[in-house]
Amino acid sequence: MSEYKLDIPGDINLSDYSSIHDYMGIIEKNDKFTITSKMNDPEEMKLLCEMLENNYFKVVTQGDQKNGEYYITSQRKR
């Protein structure tokens, strides 16, 4: 099982969503994938979770960190 991490330095724009989708394509079954970002809009994180789930990822944990970053940890289901 491999672990992947993607750090986004602020709010997500349209090209970031495309990059995230491309990045998900290299992750294999049972691999762990963590996204971190200093987003201001919680709706963006909700959208990211839905995007992951629609691409066969299970969201394992999500939340805020003490440094102001928000994180989502997921695992590829198939």
Image (cartoon, rainbow, N blue to C red):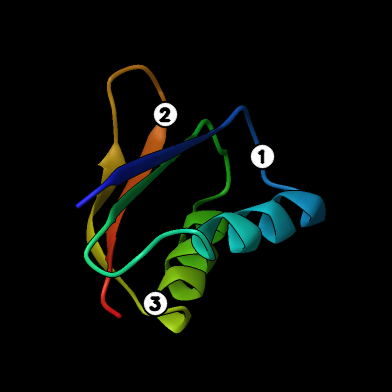
Relative to 67, residue 40 above or below? below
- Which residue is at 39% across, 77% downward? 53
Q: Amino acid at mark 1?
A: Asp
User: Which is nearer the N-term, disc 2 or disc 3?
Assistant: 3
Looking at the image, which is closer to me, 32 or 36? 32
Looking at the image, which is closer to me, 4 or 35? 4
- Which residue is at 48% across, 56% downward? 45
Residue corresponding to mark 2:
69
> Is 59 placed left or right of 22 in the picture?
left
Do callouts 2 and 3 mark residues in contact (Cβ within 8 Å)? no
Looking at the image, which is closer to me, 51 or 1? 1
Could you say whether the residue bearing mark 1 is in a helix, strand or loop?
loop
Label 2 neighbour load within 10 Å: few <14, some 14-19, many 20+: some
Q: Amino acid at mark 2?
A: Glu
Mark 2 or mark 3, whichever is nearer to me: 3
User: Which is nearer the N-term, disc 1 or disc 2?
Assistant: 1
- Which residue is at 61% across, 27% downward? 9
User: Which is nearer the N-term, disc 1 or disc 3?
Assistant: 1
Measure the alpha-carbon separation of dots 1 and 2: 11 Å
Mark 1 or mark 3, whichever is nearer to me: 3
Which of the 4 image quadrants contains residue 57? bottom left
Residue corresponding to mark 3:
53
Q: Which mark is residue 11?
A: 1
> Is 71 placed left or right of 60 in the picture?
right
Do callouts 1 and 3 mark residues in contact (Cβ within 8 Å)? no
Could you say whether the residue bearing mark 3 is in a helix, strand or loop?
helix
Measure the alpha-carbon separation of dots 2 and 3: 21 Å
Relative to 19, residue 71 above or below? above
Q: Amino acid at mark 3?
A: Glu
Location of residue 21 in the rendering, given as x and y in whole percent from the top left corner? 61, 63
Location of residue 19 in the rendering, given as x and y in whole percent from the top left corner? 69, 53
